[in-house]
Amino acid sequence: MRPSLASFAAALETPPSGPGAYGIRVAHQAAAIIAVAAMVLDTQSTLAHSYGGILSVVVWVFAVLFAVEYGLRLALAPWAHWAHRDEPWRARWHWATNFHGIVDLAGALPVLTLAVGASPAHAQLYGAAWIVKLVAYAPGLELVGRVLRNARKSMGGLFLGFCMVLIVSATIAYEAEGSVQPDTFGSIPSAMWWAVVTVTTVGYGDAVPVTLVGRVVAAMVMVCGIGMFALWTAILVTGFSYEMRRREFLRTWDLVARVPYFHGLGAGTIADVAQLLRPSDFAAGTVVVRRGQPGDCMYFIVTGEITIDIKPPVTLGPGEFFGELALITGEPRSATVVAKTACELLHLDLADFRQLTARHPDVAKQIEAEASRRRRDGVVRRETLGA
Ligand code: CMP
């Protein structure tokens, strides 16, 4: 009984796993898009008049499906892979209060509100929440969420500054303009609308100060608004670039840790080496290094195979390196190297090669020993071919 419930639970997870996961994923995304489109179009009177019946039927079919989906996911939570050996109620509580549980509950709102007496036309508007189901399939949004979480303190500080500018400017505008334009500046809350429109530099022009003080304040608020948006942008851009660098570093760290030449190094040293290496991917058949060209970098193979085009050819695989001869001898590349299969390589520039060998003499020794063996091998091959 348990394994079949576990596979059913896996198929219902977001994103789904197990057999048929891809199909379920596509169907789930398509369902959310079609349901939201039908709900939106049903509010357009001309369309609703011509196709109203069909659109409503589509909306309610999906509304019922999403409500059933919520019930099934809640019921099957104890069999989900993350539930381990949790008690059933604990697993269900955990799922119901996490992001996916809340999104699915919001997706069930049309049926729930209809059940408690809302009119169908009103209840179906809660279907707007179905669009959030797509979040689980957009990994980029996870990055955005992480950047916003990391930047929450500086963004919060800036938001506070934004609120202060709003309150102070609305108060001055109320004082300066209140008696002249009582309709728009007759109270601080009414003046706040002008302050928001001005600080965001949207400037609808429906509320415009006419007194000298009001205009001076408006000018200052607009300049403050531009400054704040510039700061907001700077915080987010810095956050994104930090997060991208962190991810790149983690990927490189993971790749470096898989290369046997670096196995003996501790975590700190691997982190140090990871800063020098850059991951690069090559498709099968790509020439990575061409014979006779000057060499300015060497490569470590993480996955895939490359062929050294010498007679007879040599194939190198994961954990091995190439391109070191040109760096050590300063001579042009001794052979052409072609990716035999798709490869993930770690690329080390000449300047970084010097740093690496200076900082890690044990790694330098291993590379030099292998380079000497290859040079000897090259001489033997030339002599054999000559003979
Ligand atoms: P480099 O001369 O910079 O560029 C070509 C690379 O092919 C070379 O460095 C070595 O890394 C590699 N190479 C050349 N000859 C051999 C060999 N006999 N065995 C293994 N690798 C080789």
Image: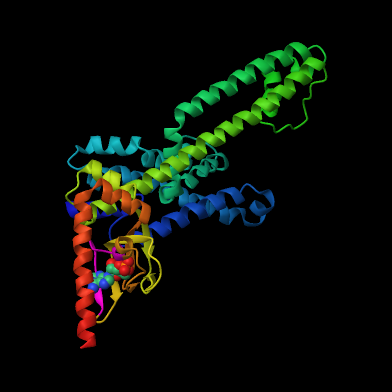
Relative image position of residue 298 (x, y in whole percent): 33, 61
Q: Residue at x 52, y 55 (%)?
A: 34
Residue 76 in sight from this viewpoint: no
Was residue 322 drawn as part of the magenta stretch in this picture? Answer: yes
Task: Give, as a single range, the part of the protein colored magenta.
Answer: 313-325
In the depicted structure, whether residue 159 falls above or below residue 107? above
Relative image position of residue 45 (x, y in whole percent): 68, 49
Q: In the image, 9: left or right of 53?
A: left
Was residue 40 drawn as part of the magenta stretch in this picture? Answer: no
Q: Quadrant of the C terminus?
A: bottom left
**Number of numbered callouts drawn:** 0
Relative image position of residue 236 (x, y in whole percent): 51, 37
Q: In the image, 150: left or right of 345?
A: right
In the depicted structure, whether residue 252 falls above or below residue 304? above
Q: Residue at x 27, y 51 (%)?
A: 357
Relative image position of residue 104 (x, y in whole percent): 40, 43
Q: Residue at x 59, y 21 (%)?
A: 163
Looking at this view, is 243 or 375 the one in front? 375
